[in-house]
Image: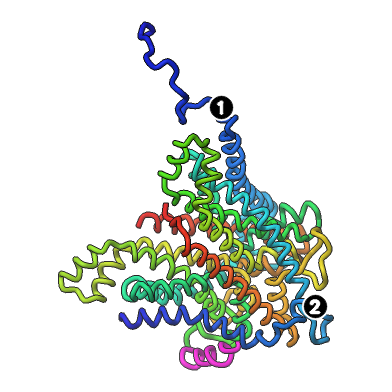
Amino acid sequence: MATTTTIVPSAGPVAGSRSFLSRLRERDEIARMITFLFAASVVLVTVLLVFELWQGSVLARHKFGFNFFRTSVWDPIFEQFGALPFIYGTLVTATLALLIAVPLGIGAAIFLAELAPARVSDTLEFFIDLLAAVPSVIYGVLGVFIVVPLMRQYVQPALKHSLGFLPLFQGPAYGVGFLTAGIVLAIMVIPYIISVSREVLLSVPRDQREAALSLGATRWESTWRVVVPFARAGIFGSIFLALARALGETMAVTMVIGNTPIVSTSLLSPGYSIAAVIANEFTEATGELHTQSLIELGLVLFLLTFLLNGFARLLIVTT
Amino acid sequence: MLTMTGVCAMVAVSVLFLILGYLAIHGGASVNWNFFTKVPVPVGETGGGLANAILGSAKMLLLATLFGVPIGFFGAIYLAEFSGSATAFVVRYAADLLNGVPSIVIGIFAYGLVVHPFKQYSTLAGGFALGLMMIPITLRSTEGFLRGVPNPLREAAMALGASKWKTIATVIVPAAYRGILTAILLAFARVAGETAPLLFTALGNQFWSPGWTHPTASLPVMIYTYALAPYDDWHRQAWAAGLVLLVLILVINIVARAILSRGIAVPRS
């Protein structure tokens, strides 16, 4: 090899194999390092967030252990903290929200993706995107001044009158409570379900529809039996995404749930949620243990949304 | 069944107009000169405005933008132009995780990091919390737009002898300019209405907040407090503030989308 004479005496440096120094001189390496610092800081911040939630709740976690999730005494004076009512309230309101939002949201998504002409679909999607941008506190204001009085005067008495024999609809009609929070939450998460589901439905290959139609299926049959099952994973993804949003939603729920830490089977009863108790008590926490218990609730909320979001992403990506 | 799906879509969209309608009816009359120029009056008196809250919000959003946008923007450049796939995966994962964190938990984090060590609720802490929320939104969408810039553009610049950095600064970023601007505006609009992270970082204030290291009022927190207070005059102002806030956010959203639709660079990577 060494005997081979070089025909090309001095080939100029190829872009990919320039030396570190020349890249440094051309500022490539500096740019790389600076932008890397910014990217790394995102990771750092996220790690710090997890660390702080974990570290900030160490006392509460050690003192109460698993009982934190099983007991329902929340007493800052005697430093007894059981989170059951908050977890219960969070789960009940989120479930109610999904029960309302899923059929409505998926129905609307089917309409936008399958039936509406492209222009109508795009226009409506534009409004749906705007709806998703409405801040939580605005929903709270409308909840307090519009939904709560409606619930108190009409909906809740009507429910008690017709379905009052069920344990779900017992007790006085306060207006605020699980049901009201669930309804407000449902309105808030519908845009997310619609946007993601529409996107997923639109990505179903045209062949699938044509095959179904050519076999004699009606428009609805092709949509419901072929297109929707094809996009099933992505639609479930949108639902988990909505669930994660509903669990972590703070302001609107705080304003309409009634803020009473009780576990009640009645949906008309006022309740409390994890996010709401953090919002209400964090600045006024009386002792270290109180603050730490609230941070532990934050940790619970974080883990729940973390799992749901991860799961949702997995489902949406696989479709 | 087909008609039912149409009804679902109409119900969903009509909510937007119901919200706007209610806010306009209840708040429209109270959006006047005083609202923008006066500070709140003591309880029991009628009148006053929310000038301090508007300024507080503006200050915190300025801080948030100065803090969140550079990290998101340069982080995105790293992801789209420099990084290998393993690093990119970690950064993206962290950003997505951060994006999914409930805003109230962001508040706890900012409290622990900025408020607790200095024993002081402040504009700075509020701006930090909001900036934190802007990072993942800016990062992920900017990255998408940068990746949307066609490769031949990069190759052409390189072929002319431009260094990588020169290529990014003079070709790629300008090409994705509209998309990036849209991403930043949307991130801004998203945090402009955030209330939960401000509750225990910026706290609230009935007066002007001097400088950057004192508790400050903000429009969203003001809406929250006023709506739950038992005074009619405060309710009136809560409606008005809600209307102002929502119109601001919707206008930013519409402008952002208009910028994008007139331009290039599709966010598909």
Report crowding for label 2: few under 14, some 14 to 19, many 20 or more residues within 10 A (C-alpha): some
Q: Viewed as shown, does residue B143 lie left or right of A76?
A: left
Q: Quadrant of residue B165?
A: top right
In-front residue for pair B252/B171: B171
Q: Quadrant location of the N terminus of chain B?
A: bottom left
Residue A61, position as x, y percentages in the image: 65, 54
Q: Is residue A150 magenta?
A: yes
Q: Secondary structure at mark 2?
A: loop
Q: Give the residues in magenta.
A: A148-164
Disc 2 marks a residue whose amino acid type is Lys
Q: How many marks?
A: 2
**Which residue is under mark 2?**
B38
Q: Viewed as shown, does residue B268 lie left or right of A170?
A: left
Instruction: Name, please, the residue furthest toward the left.
Output: A215
In-front residue for pair A12/A258: A12
State the residue at coordinates (31%, 75%): A115
Residue A278, position as x, y percentages in the image: 67, 65
Q: Viewed as shown, does residue B147 lie left or right of A55?
A: left
Q: CA distance from mark 1 to mark 2?
A: 60 Å
Q: Give the chain of mark 1.
A: A
Residue B236, position as x, y percentages in the image: 70, 85
State the residue at coordinates (24%, 75%): A219
